[in-house]
Amino acid sequence: MDAVSNTVAISCAIVVVLCAWKIVNMVWVRPKKLEKYLRNQGFNGNKYKLLFGDMKELSMMFKHSKSKHINIDDEDEVLPHVTAYNYHSLQKYGRNFVTWIGWNPRVTIMEPEIIKDVLTKLNYFQKSKSNPMVVKYLASALTSDVISRTAFGSSYEEGVHIFELITEQSVSLMEALQSVYIPGSRFLPTKRNMRMKAIDNKVNHLIRSIIDNKLKAMKAGEGNYDDLLGIMLDSNNKMVEQHQNKSHGITIEEVIEECKVFYFAGQETTSSLLVWTMILLSKHKEWQSRARDEVLNVLGDKTIDIDGLNRLKVINMIFYEVLRLYPPVVGLARQVCKDITLGGFSFPSGIQISIPTILIHYDEQLWGSDAKKFKPERFSEGISKATKNQVIYIPFGGGPRICIGQNFALLEAKLALAMILQKFLFELSQSYVHAPNIVITLQPQYGAHLILHKL
């Protein structure tokens, strides 16, 4: 009996020691090894701090930026405000540096050739797991209605609650990401975690209801399949029928997740582009006049069609420049899933690579001394000419994972802006406060207060 007890005790002790070693290795030994490994290759950054890494500094800088606004006429203030930690790390450590997200190192890269490889080599990288009229909300309502109709064949009214919930969830998620990291905190029953879980359940329920109604209509031979949801469900049904096996299709849960992407990406990115465009055209009135002249010369006051939109070259240039200065997503991240060497640097599996989109878009080494200036003419001969065929313009990502909705977003924004320019002049209200703020996408923190004058 004593022998059995001793064996059990020894086994338990071994398990405890192994678990303790795993924890120590995860939060100290491995991070310190990686820190030395990366420093030897020239990647500098703050020294690793147990458990928290750089999260305390990140959180403090984010809160400080959010507590103030900046001068819209001073382009030098944008980067320190929008991406304070990365901006200061760039100044202190150079173009390639390390940030500690808890005990995980994130390597920031600004070399175009390495960025190209990170975005294109799928086998080695995977994706990592924001009187006077407030135009921000007008633009959101417009883009929400468009994505509701094109993606789901439904109206804005049917999807409005989903948009509100997803927006609330985005704000909570961003606050959580920018707060001091406490290991395992996302599993605790805090007020924020419980609210985010409740939102997720409610969104799932609402989207499932839309899917169920679409499936019923399809079975009854009613309606059509010309919206994204209908096309996806019809294609899925055909695949299942072809293979006589449901495993060849996707589950309803997977359809729901795709629908969430439709809702968020289809609404937020286009809304962000349209709002920042109107803000910048209010500041740069000569470009607003050029855009309006083009719209009136090409389209007059007629109903706008696709052929007319394709001939709006000045508006294309303006959109490209707005996306350069105020990209919807200010950075991309990829997880290394296989050891790889890029540009002379070796990255082991598990390392996260960060591509700071907005820093690259403002980089004077890549764009010239006027990189921070609003100059749509730099795109007069297209993106390739402006970038000299380098991977330095990535507002929608790049490589095989580039945003598949980018052309739709640009077309939708172009249509909306053309219709506004046909009817209105617009200018910034004195109540407008310039404070670009990251809420998943880059948004004006206090809205876009613009005054519209009918032509």
Image: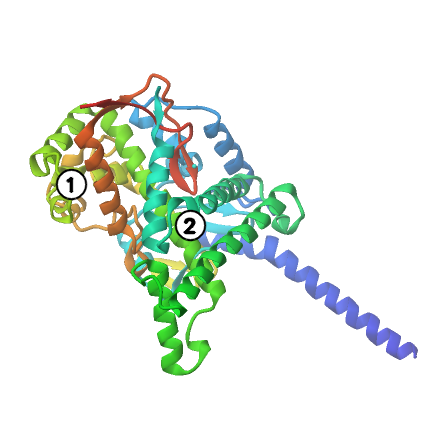
**Viewer-side residue, 369 vs 160:** 160
| Amino acid type, callout 2 | Val
Q: Name the residue under label 2.
A: 107
Q: What is the number of the mark on residue 211?
A: none
What residue is rendered at 45% in x and 77% in y?
246
Residue corresponding to mark 1: 303
Q: What's the CA distance linking mark 1 and mark 2? A: 50 Å
Q: Of the residues under marks 1 and 2, which one precedes in the sequence?
A: 2
In the picture, which quadrant includes the N terminus? bottom right
Of residues 314 and 412, the one drawn nearer to the viewer in this rendering? 412
**Can residue 261 be seen?**
yes
Binning the other alpha carbons within 10 Å of mark 2 as few (below 14), some (14 to 19) or many (20 upward) gives: many
Q: Tell me: residue 373, above or below residue 400.
A: above
SS at badge 2? strand
Q: Where is residue 130 in the image (x, y as percent from the top left)?
A: 43, 37
The amino acid sitting under disc 1 is: Thr
